[in-house]
Image: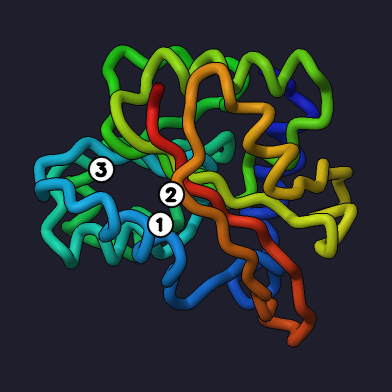
Amino acid sequence: MDTERKKHWETVYETKNPEEVSWTQEIPKTALDFIHSFHLPKSAKIIDIGGGDSKLVDYLIQEGFENISVLDISEKALEKTKLRLGDNAKKVNWIVSDITQFEPNTTYDIWHDRATFHFLTTAEHVSKYIETAQKSVNKYLILGTFSENGPKKCSGLDIKQYNEEALTNELKNSFKKINCVTEDHITPFNTTQNFLFCSFKKN
């Protein structure tokens, strides 16, 4: 595991509350819209990559999804989410892992990632990520990254911006694009970050 990267994220989640980090989103509407568009049963296996203390898991539980996993490099982030969920935390499979070293022992119907992929700035990490997704996704993939009009850094780290063509191209050997949208995310500090969200179907 990249210990520097892990240390960075543990510190972020240890020292900052949701209203102090740019990615906080009260309602993950775009993710939910994509998930609903697949019309899968509540037994569908869903994994949220880099889920941190995102509220997507809250909504999925509320909607009755029964097979939810949340992965994050930061144990602290997942602890915060478990506390927030209380008893409902028992309904979730929690995974502490760096995504570039994740070795899933199961497959997923939906792989959702808002803003983890764009932190992978080396070709080696990008191909490792895609290889893992290719092996472990049965049906659908949802990726949210900063667009070309979005920030160049996040949380003090460099990121890789994407446009629709570049993202589709990265995944073309394993996944076929269904739909892409761009969206302005308003941060808790009232700044705007432009995101690209795309959904893909496994080839």
Marks 2/1 in contact by CB < 8 Å: the verdict is yes
Up the image or down, 127 lies above or below 49; here it is above
Q: Residue 91, position in %: x, y?
A: 17, 46
Q: In this view, does 18 lie to the left or right of 22?
A: left
Q: In this view, does 105 lie to the left or right of 43?
A: right
Up the image or down, 182 lies above or below 132; here it is below
Q: Give the residue pinned by disc 2.
A: 79
Residue in the foreground of this view, choosing between 151 and 84 = 151
Q: Quadrant of the C terminus?
A: top left
Residue at 80% from the left image edge and 18% from the top image edge:
123
Q: Give the residue pinned by disc 1.
A: 81
Residue at 55% from the left image edge and 55% from the top image edge:
180
Up the image or down, 131 lies above or below 162; here it is above
Residue 68: give its label: 3
Question: Sequence-wise, which precedes: disc 1 or disc 3?
Answer: 3
Question: Sequence-wise, which precedes: disc 2 or disc 3?
Answer: 3
Residue type indicated by callout 2: Glu
Residue at 29% from the left image edge and 58% from the top image edge:
37
How far separated are the C-alphas under marks 1 and 3?
A: 13 Å
Q: Is residue 73 left or right of residue 91?
A: right
